[in-house]
Image (cartoon, grey):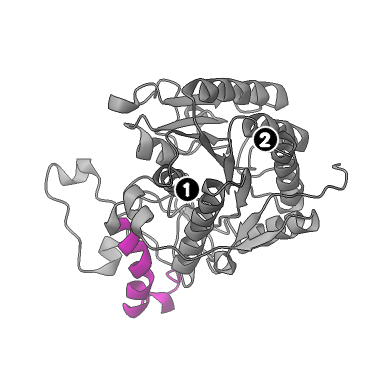
Amino acid sequence: MLSAVTLPMPVVWSDDCLRHEPAGEVWLGVREPGTEVPARALVLRDALTDAGAPVVPARPHDDAVLHAVHDPGLVEHLAGIWPAWEKAGFVVQQGRDRVVPYLFPTPGMLGGLDLRTPPAVHGRAGLYCYDTMTLIGPGSWEAIRGAADAALTAADLASSGSPLVYALCRPPGHHVTRAAYGGSCYLNNAAIAAQAMRAAGADRVAVIDIDAHHGNGTQMIFYDRADVWYGSVHVDPAAGWFPHYAGYADERGTGDGAGANRNLPLAPGTGDQGWLAAVDLLCTEAAGYGADALVVSLGLDAAEADPESPLLVSAAAYREAARRIALLAPAVLIQEGGYHLPTLGQLAVAALTGAAEARP
């Protein structure tokens, strides 16, 4: 149990992050309740404010940074797909109260044909999506945009001299590639923050991802770039875990980004010792990269009680990992996963306490 603490770290928050209610996910063909729920954000906010962290409202930003990270078509799709779905009348049909893609225009399907945008909303629902888990409903776009604004506000504060800032982003974002969303993520908040810090003058940004699942989206966005280094510790996708197709150790970057990507997949059942050793290796490589700014994809789902991963990490290990990571450079911590509501707040307080210990 953590002793009482007073956290000096700003918590950037948008009320809009509560508006996204996916009402479940379609997992292996079956609609299930899902764990990415609005209560996550409330648990996190309340635990951190109870620990003394000041809340800073997210400020609206324009789409310029979003378009520097994402295909503008993806942003437009996310903003408009729910109104179109509603207008088409699907919301009154059983099981169709959310946008659920059923067809995905993969390269194998198109066989070299140009990618068209189908006029029918149910046809284009999968145009920018790559799974059936990531549903969209009323209020989703406002929450997606609120999370991005929280990340951008945190990046602004860090670029103005704040040594540590936490963005309470919900929905999370690290599974979103330049032009495709999935994994309960819609815009890549960590990538948006990293790009904003580069635009504000940081020469090199390191992104360290400690979510239980590999941040395939962040990796892909920066895979051919030398100015942003990405490192991740996560459960081995070869053991049957999302994102399945990415997150392997031999993915090291390409072109200008060759060597600027590091994946450390862990076996299911890995606990504190193995996890912290992997975090240490990421810290060593990030230090060698020479970043002058840092983004942390703070997933709390590697914890031993979390229903979404087989890793067994304690709150004490999260505290120590965050302390070691925060020693590297001024940091923006971006909330990613973490789904066990009874322990989620304790884990967040532990992580932010550790980071604050590194930069008092």
Q: Is residue 60 magenta?
A: no
Question: Residue 1 is drawn in which quadrant?
Answer: top right
Q: Which residue is mark 2?
A: 322
Residue at image mark 1: 193
Q: Considering the numbered disc 1 on the image, is that residue within a helix, a strand or a loop?
A: helix
Q: Could you tell me how many numbered marks the image carries? A: 2
The segment highlighted magenta reads: 74-97
Label 2 Cα crowd, 10 Å radius (few <14 / some 14-19 / many 20+): many
Mark yes or no: residue 254 visible: no
> Residue at image x 44%, y 63%?
61
| Quadrant of the rendered image containing residue 123 | bottom left
108 vs 94: above or below: above
- Is residue 87 magenta-colored? yes
| Image-based side of 122 in relation to 44, left or right | left
The residue depicted at 58 percent of the width and 55 percent of the height is: 36
Q: Is residue 81 left or right of residue 149?
A: left
Is residue 273 depicted above or below 332 in this figure?
above
x then y, percent, for residue 85: 35, 72
Q: Is residue 120 visible?
A: yes
Q: Quadrant of the C terminus?
A: top right
Q: Amino acid at mark 2?
A: Ala
Residue at image point 34% right, 69% down = 80
Q: Position of residue 351 (x, y in %)?
A: 70, 41
